[in-house]
Structures are given as structure tokens and as C-alpha cells.
Image (cartoon, rainbow, N blue to C red):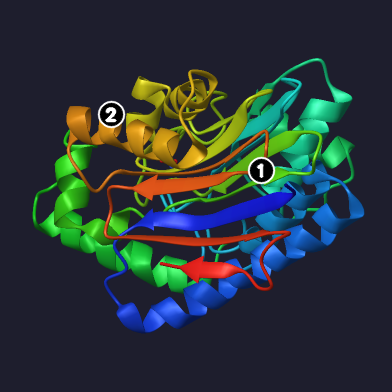
Amino acid sequence: MVAIIVHGGAGTIRDESRIPKIKKGVGEAVLAGWRELKRGSALDAVEEAVKALEDNPLFNAGTGSVLTVDGKVEMDAAIMRSNLEAGAVAGIWGVKNPISVARKVMEKTDHVLLGGEGAVKFARLMGFNDYNPTTEERIDQWKKLREKLLNDGQIPHWKKISELIREYPEVLRSTVGAVAFDGGEVVAGTSTGGVFLKMFGRIGDTPIIGGGTYANEFAGASCTGLGEVMIKLVLAKSAVDFVRFGLTAQKASEAAISIATEHFGSDNAGVIMIDARGNIGFAKNTKHMSVAYLNEEMKEPYIGV
Ligand code: GLY
């Protein structure tokens, strides 16, 4: 069954008046992906859905990405097909849609992951124009959060990142992603600005194949949350492996998140999945995770936070 699911990040939405806008954003993204899926391509569907989220400044990816400790935007993205073709960028800046650059890495190079200056250089070669994804809202948040953390003496660095995020859940403004099945293949894609006040050069789980993004002939998965957790647990691949060993996409999502909780406590992880029959699954150990999905049996998308 043809199907698509998107997420706009897991975490705590402290200002709940934002929720209707967030729901609208994931709803629009799933419909953008669905339009492509109806034309027959899970790959185009995932790219378009993720682009819609990257272009919406509410979400922490593309326009509206959070800022590093030194006030810069460094974005990560990855896309992967069930035939194991994959492309990713890490610590890229100056582009509007990192997911599209990741797709070009997959289609135009022999590599999987390009980082930093090399990724920017490649993007320019591929015709991606210079673009500043920094928004005023993110600059204000960066100033306030940095002040607060420095005054409270909570950081000179990210040694206690999990505790820090528990205390300041707004630090984790997480990631967007999409997974789609077009009747033939599953494709997964993820994009993020990372974590507020991350150290310059820090790379999260999103562009790490198997960490935050994975697809094979059994299923696809896109993760959200604190990247260090997903990297250490190879969480996207683990979730897909659960499907390989017989779990439904929903049970596999729950099993993957329970591993994250078991090792690192709650408030750090979410995952969306589709298996190679089009069955959908999603799970989180955070208060919120914005999700929208649609399949051919549904008249309109499910949208939840
Ligand atoms: N999950 C996004 C990040 O930690 O970078």
C-alpha cells in the first residue's frame, strides 16, 4: 500500500500555542509528499516533503535551523533508498534545502557523505545558490539561551548534554523527516539544524546512515531527538532490523525507542517508519512529536503532536 509519513521533530513544545501551526506544517508537508507519491516516486515524495519542512521556519531544518554555540547554522541531511543507495551532507551551510544536496550526493558522486566546506563546494557545483537560513527568531532564541546557560554555569561544553536538555527542553528543537513507500521501494530522508548551542563542527545522527536515517528492502526509518543517542545505538538501522526479524513497523518503532529509553532515559528520541508493504509506525519517548501520515485507504492525513 502506497504510504507516506513525516515528522517535524520530537521534544517538548513548551509554548503550546505553537501546536496548531506545527500541525499545519506537518500536514502541508505530508500532502506535498503525497502529490509526488501519486505520480509514483517515493524518492521525489520524501524530497518534497522534507523540503516543505525545511522551508517552514517553525521547524529546525533549512530555514529556521538552530544556531551553534558561536552563532552559525550548520545543517545535516540524508536520504536513502531500499536498494541501499544513499547520500548525505553534514555541517553544510549557505543552502536552502540540504535534503536536495544530499540527493545529489547520492546521484552524482561515488560517495555517501560530504561534510563542511566540501559539501558547500559540491552544492555550488550542482547549482545550489547561496542562501542564508538564519531567522531573527532563532537569533533571539540563541541570545537568550546562551545567556541563560552561561549565567547558570550549565555549560562551558556539552559534557552533560542529556541533563542539560532535560532541564532546558527547548534546547532540543529537533529535526524533520519523511519515509515513503511507492509500491516498489521505501525511501527515508531526514534534515536538521542539529541542537541549539551545539559545538562548531558537531555532527548529529541525521546524516549518519543507520544512525538517524536508514532504508533497505524491509523498511525505512527517520529518527529525531538527541543525535548522540541515535548514533550510539545505530537506532534507525536497529528499527529496520526489528522489521526484518518479524515485527510490524509500529512494534519495531516502539522497540527501537524502548532501547533508547533503557540506555539514556526519556526525552531524547523519536522515530517514524514504513515497511515494504506500506505499513506505518512511529514512537517517541518525548512529550511531543509532530507526525502526519497518509495512505491510499485514508481520505485525509492523520496529524498529531
Ligand atoms: N537529531 C538531530 C541532531 O541531534 O542533530
Total tally of numbered discs in the picture: 2
In the rendered view, tell whether residue 293 sits above or below residue 82.
Answer: below
> Which residue is found at the position 36% from the left and 52% from the top?
196
Nearer the camera: disc 1 or disc 2: 1
In which quadrant of the rendered view does residue 115 lie?
Answer: top right
> Which residue is found at the position 69% from the left and 72% from the top?
299
> Which residue is found at the position 75% from the left and 17% from the top?
111
The residue under label 1 is: 278
* Residue at the extreme top of the image, as rendered: 110
Question: Closest to the observer: 211 or 179?
Answer: 179
* Residue at the extreme left of the image, as rendered: 152
In the rendered view, tell whether residue 183 sits above or below residue 235.
Answer: below
In the visual, does 85 lie left or right of 244? right
The disc labelled 1 sits on which kind of residue? Gly
Observer able to see residue 61: no
Query: At numbered mark 1, what does the secondary structure look like: helix, strand or loop?
Result: loop
In which quadrant of the rendered view does residue 274 lie?
Answer: top right
Task: Give how far apart the Cα atoms at labels 1 and 2 are.
Answer: 24 Å
The disc labelled 2 sits on which kind of residue? Ile
Query: At numbered mark 2, what does the secondary structure look like: helix, strand or loop?
Result: helix
In the rendered view, tell whether residue 207 sits above or below residue 151.
Answer: above
Res. 259 mark: 2
